[in-house]
Amino acid sequence: INGITKYFLLDTGASDLVIDTETERELLLNGTLKRESYIGRAQYELVNKDIVNGHLVLLNNVSIGDYKVNNLVAVIIEDGSLLCGKSRPA
């Protein structure tokens, strides 16, 4: 994500790309995330049926191997895992 390399679990059943607050902090520090990157909030139901709140953000320059996506909606979940789901473009 904009030059930060992370290893994600690929989950085709997941609805979005999920990042944790540590990755959010890195993206804030390198200037990838800005105030205008935050586009809303959403609730998610986890596998164990817990409901968690997340911040929706707009990411640019997400690469998986040679595949690149711009303007991708992701969710930041506190204590979340790095999860690569079927996110939607903005």
Image (tube, rainbow, N blue to C red):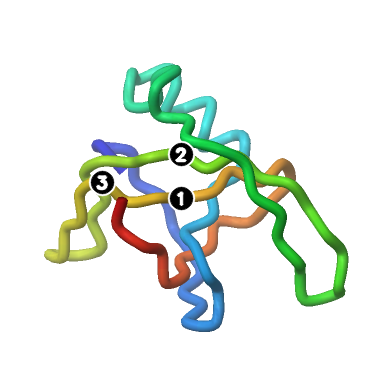
Nearest to the observer: residue 12 or residue 90: 90
Residue 59 screen position, x and y as percent: 33, 41
67 left or right of 64 in image: left
Secondary structure category for the residue under label 2 = strand
Q: Which residue is found at the position 25% from the left and 41% from the top?
A: 60
Circle 3: residue type: Asn
Secondary structure category for the residue under label 1 = strand
- In the image, is residue 32 above or below residue 3? above
86 left or right of 71 in image: right
Q: What's the CA distance linking mark 2 and mark 3?
A: 9 Å
Dot 1 corresponds to which residue?
Answer: 74
59 left or right of 75 in image: left
Circle 1: residue type: Ala
Q: What's the CA distance linking mark 2 and mark 1?
A: 5 Å
User: Badge 3, how many Cα within 10 Å: few under 14, some, many 20+?
Assistant: some
Residue 12 screen position, x and y as percent: 47, 82
Instruction: Give the tally of numbered discs.
Output: 3
Q: Which residue is found at the position 25% from the left and 37% from the top?
A: 3
Dot 3 corresponds to which residue?
Answer: 71
Residue 58 screen position, x and y as percent: 37, 40
Residue 47 screen position, x and y as percent: 77, 76
User: Badge 2, how many Cα within 10 Å: few under 14, some, many 20+?
Assistant: many
The answer to whether marks 2 and 1 mark residues whose Cβ atoms lie closer than 8 Å is: yes
Q: What's the CA distance linking mark 3 and mark 1?
A: 10 Å
Circle 2: residue type: Val
- Residue 57 is labelled as 2
Q: Which residue is found at the position 36% from the left and 62% from the top?
A: 88
